[in-house]
Image: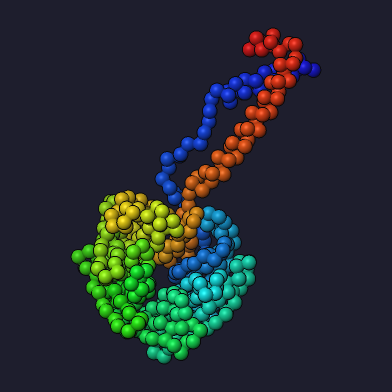
Amino acid sequence: MMMMLIPCLITLIFIHSIVAEVTITPSPADLPSNRYFVENQLPIADQTHELVKVKDIVLISQLSNSVLVKVQVDKYGVAQQVAGFQVANPNSNLHGLGLSTKYPGMVWLTLEGDHKLVLIDPMTDSVTDAPKVIKEIDVPPNGKGPHYIGEYEDNLWVSLKGSDEVLRINYENPNDFKLYKGEKTPIFVAQHPINKMFYSSQDKVSKIMKINPANNQILQYNVDTSKGTTPVGLISGPKGVWFALLGSDKAGTGTFGFIDKDDKIFYHKLKTPLGKDAALLHLAFDVAYGINHQMYLLSSSIINSNALDMIIKVTFDEQWTTIKNEEVIMIPTQQCKAHRLLPTEFNIFATELTASKLLTLFSPLRNKKKKISKNYIKQSISIIQKIKKVVVDLKSDPGFGSNLAQL
């Protein structure tokens, strides 16, 4: 019996010698990061707009039929289940989505057609559970078309596209509100992290409105049209407020801007062959931007059919004044009028306005590296221990030396 096992045992000895002399360790793949795409199909709609994420559920607004889509995703953002829910009626024009900090897990909605602000419980335990309405707030008289919505302490700040205004309203006491008259057309609203003023992008006039909530003073700042036009995406970020310039229906300029605490505007111009003429609609910062100094820009064909739909990753220096690197990532479905960005810890989401898709951009190699390394080490140690035991047992066999000499 032992003689029959000897060839197998000799093979194990040979494997042991290889393991002992040749080391195998994880090595960086040197592949571009975030190169893996999944385009998750959503219910068909003419316009797919905003998105937020609560737990493992991504909520997406479809304005054209006022449908709220719930997408359950895995760790990497790949859709596992999808369900749609009619919000009010098909003409209510669901648009804005904003996470609540006062009510964790709850989400604010805007109904552009009904001129309403709505707080919902998205019911994240199940994709198929219909969201529940917690609170409804009517936009004050003469205010129309709530678009963006954001919660700031006890107030909601809302852009009103239909009446060219920005609304501040106390969600606990809706009688406490203020309407700020702007120019055409307020799109986003953001609070400056340093001076605490509020700013709104006005795309039709290429201006940015500044609001002082303490004295209700309004100032208007012109975008430098030699740099670009049509400010749309506008968000709070490192050291100030950042905004994207979409350009015209003929061309983009690959330019985005930054407003410091003294309202000085600085412009950043992309330089890569594809980025330098990008039509920048939206922007968002990486969740680890404090460490990696990275942000994402969304180029869109929304008003320019010649523009490319792209996600552009930009890395800054530690002072956020100089671009160090640009990486352009093409969206697989072109002419989708890419609309919004949402970075998370493991991936980046983007909505495709006319394609009814949720794009997921992720890197499984980067995210699985630690797990693979640990499993590799555990398995290697286990195999080596088993082989060593076989070798010890073999050495106790009188025929060990002669059989080994036959190799």
282 with respect to 132 (left or right): left
- Give the residue at x 44% y 86%: 139
In the image, is residue 159 above or below residue 362? below
- Name of the residue lying farthest toward the right: 1
190 with respect to 384 (left or right): left
- Give the residue at x 62% y 20%: 14
221 with respect to 4 (left or right): left
- Of residue 188 and residue 205, the one placed in the foreground of this image is 188
- Give the residue at x 28% y 55%: 322
Coordinates of residue 358 in the picture (x, y in percent): 48, 61
In the image, is residue 389 above or below residue 94? above
Q: How many marks?
A: 0
In the image, is residue 217 above or below residue 374? below
Q: Quadrant of the N terminus?
A: top right
- Give the residue at x 32% y 79%: 211
Coordinates of residue 90 in the picture (x, y in percent): 51, 79
Q: What kind of colouring is applied to the model shown?
A: rainbow
Can the viewer see residue 49?
yes
Q: Quadrant of the C terminus?
A: top right
- Name of the residue lying farthest toward the left: 226
Can the viewer see residue 44?
no
Coordinates of residue 218 in the picture (x, y in percent): 29, 81
Coordinates of residue 227 in the picture (x, y in percent): 22, 64
371 with respect to 50 (left or right): right
